[in-house]
């Protein structure tokens, strides 16, 4: 399912001012500045479930469900910011979107094993490291940022990074050396995302 043309075309950006989610209040500011987790969650949902949600749809569904999208994820699983797919939110994400999170190792081997599965993607965060675009151009990101690793093929780990336009962010190739460097950036959260059982 995720390797289809549809899967390749799934992509949302946080840099297009005309998108209806660009100015939504989120965390300490808005989706433009802090919404990479929300936008990455939306891509995970659409890749795994066949839905066509936009980040605004996901935002509105979570708001209606009663989740606080202005504060950092808490122990009770009532706040989401910075932890859109934390294990504490599994109950809510199963109910709202039919997906769930699983803890995984932060290694290239673990990433490959997850991506070789038909129905798994990775919601992954790092910081203080280089993030790539479609052409391999590097952008150093000191703050935390979330991207979606969605497929593995011939030694390449492909990611979707919402900090770019559609042309440069929807299917970014990371070779193993780039991925290992990215993984060493910071021990940030990352999860295997699957359809809920």
Image (tube, rainbow, N blue to C red):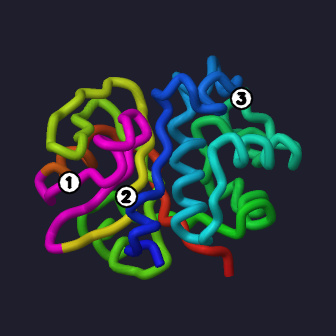
Rendered image quadrant of residue 137: top left
- Residue at left offset 47%, top offset 57%: 10
**Mark-to-mark CA distance, 1 and 3:** 32 Å
Q: Which residue is mark 1?
A: 174
- Residue at left offset 25%, top offset 34%: 129
- Residue at left offset 22%, top offset 72%: 153
Closer to the N terminus: mark 1 or mark 3? 3
Q: Residues within 10 Å of mark 2 (few under 14, many from 20)?
A: many
Instruction: Indicate the secondary structure of the residue bearing disc 1.
Output: strand
Q: Which residue is mark 3?
A: 71
- Is 33 positioned to the left or the right of 111 in the image? right
* Contact? badges 3 and 2 (CB < 8 Å): no
Residue 149: numbered disc: 2
Q: Residue 56 location, x and y as percent?
A: 69, 40
Is residue 49 located in the magenta-colored stretch of the structure?
no
Instruction: Indicate the secondary structure of the residue bearing disc 2.
Output: strand
Is residue 174 located in the magenta-colored stretch of the structure?
yes
Which stretch is magenta?
154-177
């Amino acid at each position: 399912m995720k390797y289809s043309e549809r899967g390749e075309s799934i992509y949302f950006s946080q840099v297009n001012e005309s998108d209806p989610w660009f100015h939504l209040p989120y965390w300490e500011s808005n989706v433009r500045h802090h919404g990479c987790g929300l936008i990455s969650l939306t891509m995970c949902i659409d890749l795994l479930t066949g839905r066509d949600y936009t980040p605004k749809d996901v935002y509105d569904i979570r708001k209606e469900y009663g989740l606080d999208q202005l504060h950092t994820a808490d122990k009770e699983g009532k706040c989401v910011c910075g932890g859109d797919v934390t294990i504490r939110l599994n109950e809510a994400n199963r109910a709202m979107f039919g997906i769930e999170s699983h803890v995984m190792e932060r290694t290239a081997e673990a990433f490959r094993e997850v991506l070789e599965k038909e129905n798994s993607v990775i919601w992954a965060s790092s910081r203080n490291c280089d993030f790539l675009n479609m052409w391999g151009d590097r952008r150093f990101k000191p703050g935390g940022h979330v991207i979606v690793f969605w497929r593995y093929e011939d030694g390449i780990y492909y990611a979707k990074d919402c900090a770019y336009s559609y042309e440069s962010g929807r299917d970014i190739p990371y070779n193993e050396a780039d991925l290992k460097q990215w993984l060493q950036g910071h021990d940030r959260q990352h999860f295997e995302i699957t359809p809920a059982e």
